[in-house]
Image: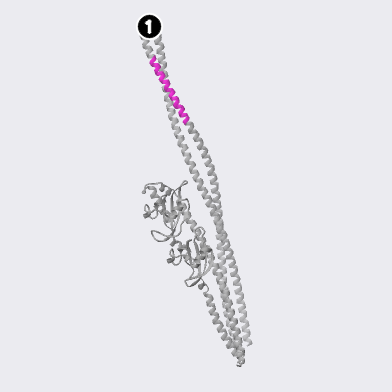
Amino acid sequence: MRLSLRSRFLIPTMILVAFGMVISALLCGMMAKGALEESADSQLRQALDLTSSRITVYLKDRKGEVLAWSQAKQCVDALHAVDAKSPERVAASDYLVRCQKQSDYFENIGLADIQGNVIAAYVASAVGKVNVKDREYFKESSKGNLFVSEVVASRTTGNAGFMIAAPVKDGENIVGVLYGTIKMNAFNETFIDPVKVGNEGQTFIFQRNGVFIAHPDKSLILKHNAADRDYGQKMMTQKEGLIHYSDQGKKWMTAFTTNKELNWTLCIAACMDEILAPIKRLYYVDAYCVAAIILVAALIIALISQSTVRPIRAISISLREEADQVASTSYQLSTSSQQVAEGTSEQAASIDETSSALEKMAGMTKQNAEHAAQARKLMVETSQVVSAANLSMEHLTASMHEISKASEETSKIIKTIDEIAFQTNLLSLNAAVEAARAGEAGLGFAVVSNEVRNLAMRSAEAAKSTANLIESTVNRIKEGAAVAEETSSEFHQVAGKITEMDGLISEITTASNEQARGIDQINRAIEEVDKVVQQNAANAEESASASENMNAQAEQMKEFVQNLTMIV
């Protein structure tokens, strides 16, 4: 079949135009798809890192609260009290109620003795009626560990939650356990529900046994296991990364990471169908454009054979309209890029201010750590001085005891002298009686016996006075020895308290150092974010500049079209 000149010119041209438009549309779609996937990947990873950091800080704060509550004096006093209605236990329950009101994250706070009996709690119905000895958190805390349990359903309310438990110590002895129940519904409302990539994105958490503990679909919590699904098994094996999978008839891209301390796996998923929806719309638009362009080209080529001027005029009009559209689009793109650049610059300034504040906080934390270390050094020196004073007091007490013993011996000797004087007095009386019987021959002997009697009476009086003085001295020495012993006991107590204060100051020093290191890590992370924001700002400014150049080229194109129209 012989083709006309119009057909010979029209058919190959339409084939080339259609082929070029299809290839161009496919390449543009593939490039746009890759860009969208990279953007979604970056957004998922940033949201994952931010959420994971927030959860880590949240758990650290809650553990710090439970540890601080366990060291309260009310808890130790309540554990030493025997009567369930004693003022110490009532004071402990009031203290736990105040603690719960200060922290809305806890559903219940309880105090159990070493046998597991709850003796004080925010929920009054649990006091004296609940025993937690068989619970894992009680067993671990009884060994001296600060323990975070797995998420389980409450035996009383049925709500999902997990326990944070800390040992209560009296000196070095563990006398009980203080525990707090974290409400998972409040946890999810704070950290899970607000995090969403796109309209259909999901954020969920499952613990080390695969059981979901946080999910937008509340019916899955504590009732479904991620290990029953292929993507869950991959996540439990890899611990962290990014995977693609299909679930519930949709394709998902999910970034995940596992908390090493709790073995919780945090997952943030984006629906690929939603992310790639603009690509599908772009394909439809390209298809319509290809069809329209083919029809327009066919019409133009058909009209070329009939007319020269009218097709050229139609082309110039079409080009002018396209140039107007390109100019309008480039102007809108330039405006949007400028707004993005300004917003990114403001964000960078805010991050700089945050980084400066964190640096000041880190400096203050390090200074606190240094002061705590100096206080500990002074406490050690004070302990040495008290120990030396305690040793001297022990020597003084021993000397007082020796003096008391010597005084008692002296008192015994004085009593012996008194008895000798008494016997001498009796003998002098007997001698006087015998001298009286002898008459004048015994007068001299009577005088001697009278003098002996006087001396015996004076010796007895002196011995009695000396005995009274020694007895008074002995009593005072005994009182001094008692006071010395009491003072020595108090020095022992002071030494014990100083040792406890040294331990507390050491813990404060350690905590301050850890806090300083944590702030340094946050500061470094903010610096990395600042770099990314600065790069985004630079890219936005480059995009705005390119849009302005495109707008200028569109205006130049309009001038060319006008010249072409004038020529036609």
Q: Is residue 554 above or below residue 185?
A: below
Could you tell whether 492 is left or right of 298 in the image? Answer: left
Query: What is the span of residues highlighted in magenta in the rendered image?
Result: 401-427
Tell me what residue is drawn at x 46 percent, y 59 percent. 150
Image coordinates of residue 109 in percent, x first then y, are 42, 55
Q: Is residue 323 above or below residue 376?
A: below
- The image quadrant where one finds the N terminus is bottom right
Q: Is residue 134 above or below residue 196?
A: above
Image coordinates of residue 326 in percent, x first then y, are 58, 79
Nearer the observer, 191 or 171: 171
Residue extending farthest to the top is 440
Q: Is residue 339 visible?
A: no
- Secondary structure mostly taken by the magenta-highlighted segment of the chain: helix
Name the element at disc 1: helix
- The image quadrant where one finds the C terminus is bottom right
Residue 428 colored magenta?
no
> Which amino acid type corresponds to the residue marked 1 in the rendered image?
Glu
Residue beneath label 1, please? 440
